[in-house]
Amino acid sequence: MVGEIVAMPQADGTPEFPDGLGEDGKRLWRRVWGQAITWISKHSDMEAAEEACRLADDLAAARKRYRATTDPRDATALVAVGKRFDEALQALAFTPASRSRLGVAEVVAVSKLEALRRRSS
């Protein structure tokens, strides 16, 4: 049985950064609200976007710590945060597989000949 699809209002620009977000998180925040604006909603996805951005900061910190210490416990923490970050990106449809499940975007290679044909049309 197919459920009813409800259209959510599209975001109109980038919301303010959440408090305490670091540079990696801010970079992802800009991408979320800039590139995924057609499928991300301020009304339903704000918390998921913020969590992904905080995980981006956590991942950068874990990577920096592991590189400084090379301690196996720090490597374990880095892997764990990396997995959570990947899951957060999937939840926001920031992976090819998750986008294809939504039917949001498809990257198509265009030959040089086809590109020329399109320009001349």
Image: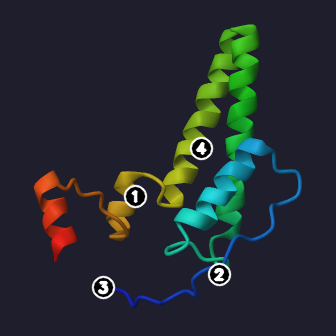
Q: Is residue 80 above or below residue 55?
A: above
Task: Report the side of 70 relative to 82 (left or right).
Answer: right
Label 1, label 4: how far apart the Cα atoms are: 14 Å
Q: Are discs 2 and 1 less than 8 Å apart at CB?
A: no
Residue at horizontal 64 percent and vertical 35 percent from the top: 81
Q: Earlier in the sequence, mark 1 or mark 3?
A: 3
Which numbered circle lies on residue 5? none
Q: Earlier in the sequence, mark 2 or mark 4?
A: 2
Q: CA distance from mark 4 to mark 3?
A: 30 Å
Query: Which element is circle 1 on?
Result: helix
Q: From the top left corner, tell me how far across and down residue 66 is, in percent.
A: 70, 17
Q: Earlier in the sequence, mark 3 or mark 2?
A: 3
Name the residue beneath numbered marker 3.
2
Q: Residue at x 32, y 70 (%)?
A: 103
Q: Which residue is mark 1?
A: 98
Q: Secondary structure at mark 3?
A: loop
The residue pinned by badge 2 equals 12
Label 2 vs label 1, nearer the camera: 2
